[in-house]
Amino acid sequence: MTKKMTLEEVSEHLNTLDGWQLAGDKEAIEKTFKFKTFNQAFAFMTCVAMKAEKMDHHPEWFNVYNRVDVTLCTHDANGISEKDFSLAAFMDKVGSS
């Protein structure tokens, strides 16, 4: 089972990412990615989906045209884990290129 991070650990890790924040319930992290076109947003989601499948760690996300709203939490840890920050860092890398 994956270990849930403390709020202190989460805060420290959030400082290493760009634009991610605690969700209202403090059991997830979230960010909105904006792209120029729907195709760019969809390409981002496709790339992330492949990585998420390899990690066996799948995001909650919502897409409208050029915007992708992402929420990450680790359900088997009942909160936020290292997996969430690993996938968030990957998303930042892919979303900025």
Image: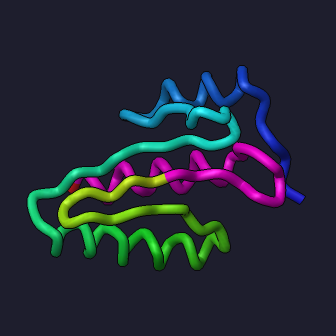
Instruction: Please state the horizontal and vertical placement of residue 32, each as a whole percent of the image.
Output: 34, 46
Q: Is 54 on the left-hand or right-hand side of 78? A: left
Toward which corner of the image does residue 70 lie, by quadrant? bottom left
Q: How is the image coloured?
A: rainbow
Task: Give whichever of 74, 90 is nearer the camera.
Answer: 74
Is 84 contained in the magenta span? yes
As drawn, 31 above or below 61: above
Identified at 70% across, 43% down, the residue is 80
Q: Is residue 18 above or below residue 52?
A: above
Q: Position of residue 41 (x, y in %)?
A: 24, 66
For the residue pair 24 and 28, the one nearer the viewer reads as 24
In the rendering, at what x and y percent does residue 47 appear?
A: 37, 74
Residue at screen point 90% across, 59% down: 1
**Tally of marks:** 0
Q: Main secondary structure of the magenta part?
A: helix
Q: Over which residues does the magenta segment extend?
A: 71-96
Quarter-wise, where is residue 46 in the image? bottom left
Residue drawn where x is 61% and y is 23% of the image: 12
Farthest right residue in view? 1
Q: Quadrant of the C terminus?
A: bottom left
**Residue 57: within the magenta?**
no
Taking the spot 82% from the left edge, 52% from the top edge, the residue there is 77
Furthest toward the left, the residue is 36
